[in-house]
Amino acid sequence: MPLSDFLSPEAIVPALKCNSKKQALQELAHRAAALTGLGEREIFETLLQRERLGSTGIGRGIAIPHGKLAKLDSLFGLFARFEKSIDFEALDSEPVDLVFVLLAPETAGADHLKALARVARILRDPSVTQMLRITREPAALYALLVDTATPNAA
């Protein structure tokens, strides 16, 4: 499953300003709502509910907040880099500066897990995360994410 199936060039935020995990989730929900047409509050509550189960901060400055929404028709991804790292209660206690939001329809089943695994695989590569941290242009960030997600990596 290529990242381009659920990540669009418009869903790249190169410098998101936020001071806390809650504020970050609110801002990410706001941007996701604008792109999906769903309610910002519904997206925020879905992401927050998932965080209550355990942090989606997977370590090395990366978080993958995710959730399922009844009104969503297809998988949706949004990538953001925070202007400054924030505490995300990550597994390694390191602050987070790279975040990939993944939203899925409630009926997505295995596709949601496949997409989540694909995102995690890409963001586990230190050379990719290094480039994501130094690249400033949204189009270049998109290209980096999509081009890294080659079919061979599946």
Image (spheres, rainbow, N blue to C red):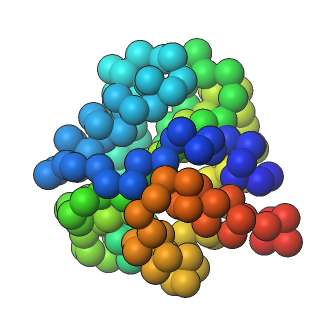
Front residue of this view, candidates 55 and 36: 36
Q: Farthest residue in the right direction?
A: 152
Can you give x and y, in whole percent of width and height, for residue 152 in the image?
Answer: 85, 72
Question: Residue 47, position in %: x, y?
Answer: 39, 37
**Hey, which residue is sitting farthest bottom in the picture?**
127
Residue at the image position 27 percent from the left and 34 percent from the top = 26
Question: Residue at horizontal 68%, vertical 21%?
Answer: 73
Q: Quadrant of residue 103?
A: top right
Query: What residue is drawn where x is 39% and y is 32%?
Result: 31
Asked whether the viewer can see residue 39, the reply is yes
Q: In the image, residue 130 lies at what x, y percent? A: 46, 80
Between 89 and 30, which is closer to the camera in this rendering?
30
Q: What is the count of numbered marks?
A: 0
75 is higher (above) or lower (below) than 62: above
- Can residue 89 be seen at all in this image of the molecule? no
Q: Judge whether 91 appears above or below 145 on screen.
A: below
- Asked if residue 97 lies left or right of residue 38, the reply is left
Residue at 40% from the left image edge and 72% from the top image edge:
133
Residue 46 image offset from top left, x and y in percent:
41, 31
Question: Quick one: quadrant of the C terminus?
Answer: bottom right
Give the residue at the far left of this rendering. Answer: 19
| Left or right of 124 on screen, residue 153 | right
Q: On the image, which quarter does residue 39 sit in? A: top left
